[in-house]
Image (cartoon, rainbow, N blue to C red):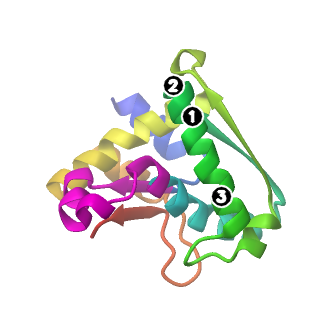
């Protein structure tokens, strides 16, 4: 664990994450509750675009973990809709200024970015459940969250 914390803390990367409290979301919005994975993509895009703009990047490939053909198609359609139409907080023009592509990979492919995401996911989940930010793995990755303009944070928690 100590070596893993060293790797996660010493590596150069930026986290843009979205955590959806599924039960709370369902309780709050009932039958109007949005699909959590689709909502998560929206929240991440709203943070990714400012990050890309800050770094003068005009292309991005989103590498998503495959969850099955049907689920992948639905997620891709929602992703494309956001890119074309924008979101409540991100105008479509800003999204269209970035050449986005989305690719799906099965977990067995062992994509490095997916492995890093998995290593960050548990500490984030534990932090959300307990509220304890002193948990060592979370403390290690805390400085890796994107800190964007205004109130844009690399850790979006919904609903609050």
How would you rate the neighbour count of disc 1 (Cα within 10 Å): few for under 14, some for 14-19, many for 20 or more?
A: some
Give the quadrant of residue 51. Answer: bottom right
Pointer 2 and pointer 3: residues touching (CB < 8 Å)? Answer: no
Q: Which residue is mark 2?
A: 68
> In this picture, is 124 found above or below 34?
above
Image coordinates of residue 2 in percent, x first then y, are 35, 32
Closer-to-camera residue (100/84)? 84
In the rendered image, the residue lying farthest to the front is 31
85 sits to left or right of 141: right
Closer-to-camera residue (152/82)? 82
> In this picture, is 29 found above or below 99?
below
In the rendered image, the residue lying farthest to the bottom is 150
84 sits to left or right of 24: right
Give the quadrant of residue 1. Answer: top left
How would you rate the neighbour count of disc 3 (Cα within 10 Å): few for under 14, some for 14-19, many for 20 or more?
A: some
Q: CA distance from mark 2 to mark 1?
A: 6 Å
> What is the magenta range?
17-39
Give the secondary structure at mark 3. Answer: helix
């Amino acid at each position: 664990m100590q070596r893993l914390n060293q790797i996660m803390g010493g590596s150069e990367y930026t986290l843009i994450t979205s955590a959806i409290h599924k039960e709370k979301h369902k309780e709050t919005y009932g039958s109007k509750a949005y699909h959590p994975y689709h909502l998560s993509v929206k929240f991440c895009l709203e943070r990714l675009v400012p990050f890309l703009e800050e770094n003068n990047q005009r292309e991005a490939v989103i590498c998503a973990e495959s969850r099955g053909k049907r689920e992948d198609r639905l997620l891709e359609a929602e992703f494309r809709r956001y890119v074309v139409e924008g979101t409540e907080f991100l105008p479509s023009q800003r999204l269209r200024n970035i050449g986005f592509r989305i690719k799906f990979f099965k977990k067995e492919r062992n994509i490095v970015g997916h492995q890093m995401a998995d290593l960050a996911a548990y500490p984030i989940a534990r932090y959300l459940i307990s509220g304890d930010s002193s948990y060592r793995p979370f403390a290690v990755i805390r400085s890796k969250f994107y800190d964007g303009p205004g109130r844009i944070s690399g850790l979006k928690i919904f609903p609050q």
